[in-house]
Amino acid sequence: MKNSYPKIIFFVPGLFLLLCIILKGCTIPPTPPVITSETALVRIAPGEFPLFEDDMNYDGLAHGILQSLEYMNRLPPDRAFSFGKDRFETPHMIKSLEFFLDFIRGNPSHKALRQFIADHYRVYGSVGSPSPGHVLFTGYYEPVLQGRRKPGPIYKIPVYGRPDDLVSIDLSKFSAEFKGKKLIGRYTGSTIVPYHDRQAIDTGDILRQKSKPLVWIKDPIDLFFLQIQGSGKVILENGDALYLHYHITNGRPYRSIGKLLIKKNKISKDEMSMQKIREYLTGHPSEMREIFNYNPSYVFFKFEKKGPLGSLNVKLSPHRSIATDRRLFPKSALAFINTQKPLIDGNGKIKNWSAFSRFVLNQDTGGAIRGPGRVDLFFGCTPDAEVGAGHMQHAGSLYFLILEPDKLSL
């Protein structure tokens, strides 16, 4: 596979260069360019396309495409989607997905698939980060927890809905320069101030009159990871399932406790996984609250009739839905990934990792998924999904596909 990415050249103004010469070769590192939706993807030539193969033999792909079409059919026809410097409106996106769906329903060979894409589609590659084309893939899953509608001696950890005093302000209504930005806080009667951070929420009674718990669960570690995953299923004592879905955060920045534990030499970088974090927290309960508070971000939930749902409010497809930075990549679009997948034995242990490639749909986002070099792959809600998602931290590449404009009449 050959990738093609733009070469970035920094030009130094003449006066500045002269000063550097006078100062005998001083070196001033250039400021990295700000990545936008126009620069996050670069169109690549057909001769440089990746080797299009799907390791799941198209299984589940039709469902994923139909979910993206459900989202697209709710949008106005003039909604624009950025593929690097190129923009395509809703009808073009719909046709692109439908045309691909019709083709893969015939279960084509890899050779036929590659020819089909070369004949009909444009392909764009992520510029990646920090090095060109480098994309870090992680995983997420749908937790399944035991819970109760009322608190008790065992079920005493509340899962909160959106507080009454939390406000979200669309800043683009004040100025075009704030397009895509919003402010989350609380109104004090005369001004807007930041909303309470995790420490204040967990150690005080500030939500007592502001938010009624949706459900009660057993373990604060489960709640923390539920917030990280963004959705989950709670099984009640009668066997009924409640689907919890991300509603809004407190507006505070997300900070990774995994990075904190690596920095403090609690867990090595090579061993880092969600399972290792849980193991450490369980074995060091006195440190748990301090570690949690390192991440001031706090997620509030809402009930849904089905799940799990992504940020587009469509049902996620295991191994076919990805989360990316919504500011950079086209929502619901057809994508193609190359990275590593875990091979899990009958005991729920990872035997090894192997290279794979497959088609996915861009149907979700996340607070920690920032920049052109991050992708989160949805693993589903099985025990194996938790194992795979918890350990996945592998490099790879990301591409997006869109039907050529002159093929719309097909």
Image (tube, rainbow, N blue to C red):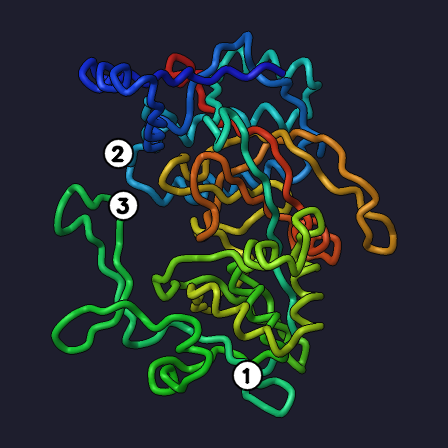
Disc 3 on helix, strand or loop? Answer: loop
Q: Are marks 2 and 1 in contact (CB under 8 Å)?
A: no
Give the image location of residue 345, x and y in percent: 85, 48
In the displayed structure image, the side of residue 21 where residue 6 appears, left or right = right
Q: Which residue lies most toward the right here?
A: 346
Instruction: Residue 180: give its label.
Output: 3
Q: Name the residue furthest top.
A: 47
* Side of 207 where 139 appears, left or right: right
Distance between the alpha carbons at the discs numbered 2 and 1? 44 Å
Rendered location of residue 178, percent (x, y): 20, 46
Q: Which residue is mark 1?
A: 149
Position of residue 106 in the picture relative to residue 76 (left or right) = right
Mark 2 / mark 3, whichever is N-terminal? 2
Residue beneath the point at 66% across and 29% down:
357
**Where is mark 2, residue-wise?**
78
Residue 183, labelled with which disc?
Answer: none
With respect to residue 294, does 44 lie above or below?
above
Q: Amino acid at mark 3?
A: Gly
- Circles 3 and 1: CB atoms closer than 8 Å: no
Pointers 2 and 3 in contact (C-beta within 8 Å): no
Dot placed on the residue nearer the N-terminal end, 2 or 1: 2
First in sequence, mark 3 or 1: give its number.
1
Q: In the image, what residue type sits under mark 2?
A: Asp
Disc 3 versus disc 1: nearer the observer: 3
